[in-house]
C-alpha cells in the first residue's frame, strides 16, 4: 500500500501509514492498494493551553510544604527556604530551595512564569530546574536568572537527545522582575519574556520534553549542585 497527504503542512503520513500532525487545519489522507484508492478527511485541532500548576506561597510562616492550587501537587521547603506569610518564599542563596515533583511529564510544550526579586550575588543562580536531580548536570531543563557576573540570563535544555541554549542580556540580578519561559518544540520555538516583553527567542528547537527525566524539579537549586553550584 502507498499513502499520501493532501497537505503536508497539516499532516504527514509515512510509508507505513503512520500519520503525524504538523499544523492546524483539515486535509485528506489517501491510501492506495492493488489499483484501489480511498481517502479520508482528517482535521488537526491545535492543543489548548491549560494551567496545570500554580504555587502562590500563601501558607503561613513556618510551613514546610506548599500546595499547588490547581492540581494539589506538593512542594517542600528545603534548607534555608522560608515563607514570609505575604505570598512569597525567600531563598537564602546558600542552602534554600523548594523541591517540586516532575511537572514536565506528559507535556508537549510548557510555559513557566514567575515573579522574583533577587540579589546580584551569588552569581549563576537558577530560578527553576527539572531533570534527573542527580546534581551532575547530565539531564535538565532550567532557567538561570543571572550568571557571568550578572552579564546574562539563560534558558536551556540538556539531554541525551540534544541541547538547546537561549541567552538574554544582561543578567537580572538586583531586580524585581516577571519572567516567562516558553518552550514549544512542536512549533520549534524557545523564548524568554521579561515583564511581558520578548527578551530573546530562537527557532528550530525540536528536543522533546520527554527527553527530560521526570524525577523532579526545584525552585532555586542548580542541576549542578553536586559540584558546588550556588543555590
Image (tube, grey):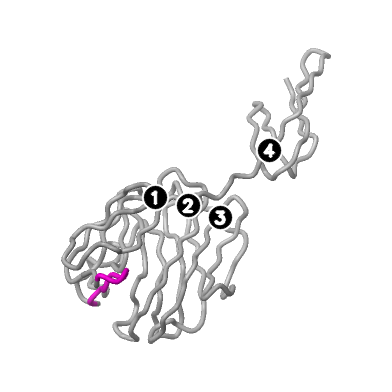
Instruction: Tell me the CA gap for discs 2 and 4.
Output: 22 Å
* Mark 2 nearby-residue class (10 Å; few <14, some 14–19, many ≥20): few
Of the pair 70 and 150, the residue shown nearer to us: 70
Instruction: Tell me the CA gap for discs 4 and 3.
Output: 17 Å
Residue designated by label 1 = 70
Secondary structure found at label 4: strand
Of marks 1 and 4, the one in the foreground: 1
| First reached walking from the N terminus: tag 2 or tag 4 | 4
Say which residue appears at 30% left-offset and 64% top-offset: 57
Secondary structure found at label 1: loop
Residue 223, how many percent across, how many down? 31, 64
Secondary structure mostly taken by the magenta-highlighted segment of the chain: loop
Q: Which numbered disc covers residue 44?
A: 4
* Mark 1 nearby-residue class (10 Å; few <14, some 14–19, many ≥20): few
Residue designated by label 2 = 51
Instruction: Tell me the CA gap for discs 1 and 4.
Output: 28 Å
Residue 3, how many percent across, how many down? 74, 27
Residue 211, how many percent across, how many down? 43, 49
Secondary structure found at label 3: strand
| Mark 2 touches mark 4? (CB < 8 Å) | no
Residue designated by label 3 = 184
Instruction: Tell me the CA gap for discs 1 and 2.
Output: 8 Å
Residue 88, how many percent across, how many down? 31, 70
Residue 105 horizontal side relative to residue 197, left or right:
left
| First reached walking from the N terminus: tag 1 or tag 3 | 1
Residue 142 horizontal side relative to residue 122, left or right:
right
Q: Which residues are magenta?
A: 85-92
* Mark 3 nearby-residue class (10 Å; few <14, some 14–19, many ≥20): many
The image quadrant that residue 231 belongs to is bottom left
Amino acid at each position: 500500500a502507498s499513502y499520501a497527504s493532501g497537505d503536508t503542512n497539516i499532516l504527514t503520513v509515512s510509508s507505513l501509514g503512520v500519520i503525524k500532525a504538523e499544523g492546524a487545519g483539515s486535509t485528506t489522507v489517501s491510501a492506495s492498494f492493488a489499483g484501489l484508492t480511498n481517502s479520508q478527511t482528517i482535521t488537526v485541532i491545535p492543543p489548548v493551553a491549560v494551567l496545570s500548576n500554580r504555587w502562590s506561597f500563601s501558607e503561613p510562616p513556618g510551613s514546610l510544604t506548599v500546595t499547588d492550587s490547581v492540581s494539589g501537587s506538593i512542594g517542600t521547603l528545603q534548607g534555608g527556604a522560608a515563607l514570609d506569610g505575604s505570598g512569597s518564599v525567600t531563598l537564602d542563596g546558600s542552602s534554600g530551595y523548594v523541591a517540586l515533583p516532575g511537572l514536565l511529564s506528559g507535556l508537549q510544550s510548557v510555559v513557566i512564569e514567575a515573579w522574583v526579586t533577587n540579589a546580584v550575588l551569588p552569581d549563576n543562580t537558577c530560578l527553576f530546574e527539572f531533570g534527573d536531580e542527580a546534581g551532575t548536570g547530565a539531564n535538565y531543563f532550567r532557567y538561570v536568572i543571572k550568571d557571568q557576573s550578572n552579564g546574562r540570563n539563560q534558558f536551556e535544555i540538556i539531554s541525551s537527545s540534544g541541547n538547546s541554549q537561549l541567552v538574554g542580556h544582561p543578567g537580572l540580578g538586583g531586580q524585581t522582575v516577571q519572567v516567562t519561559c516558553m518552550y514549544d518544540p512542536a512549533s520549534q520555538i524557545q523564548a524568554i519574556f521579561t515583564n511581558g516583553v520578548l527578551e530573546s527567542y530562537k527557532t528550530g528547537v525540536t528536543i522533546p520534553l520527554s527527553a527530560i527525566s521526570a524525577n523532579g524539579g526545584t525552585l532555586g537549586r542548580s542541576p549542578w549542585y553536586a559540584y558546588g553550584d550556588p543555590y
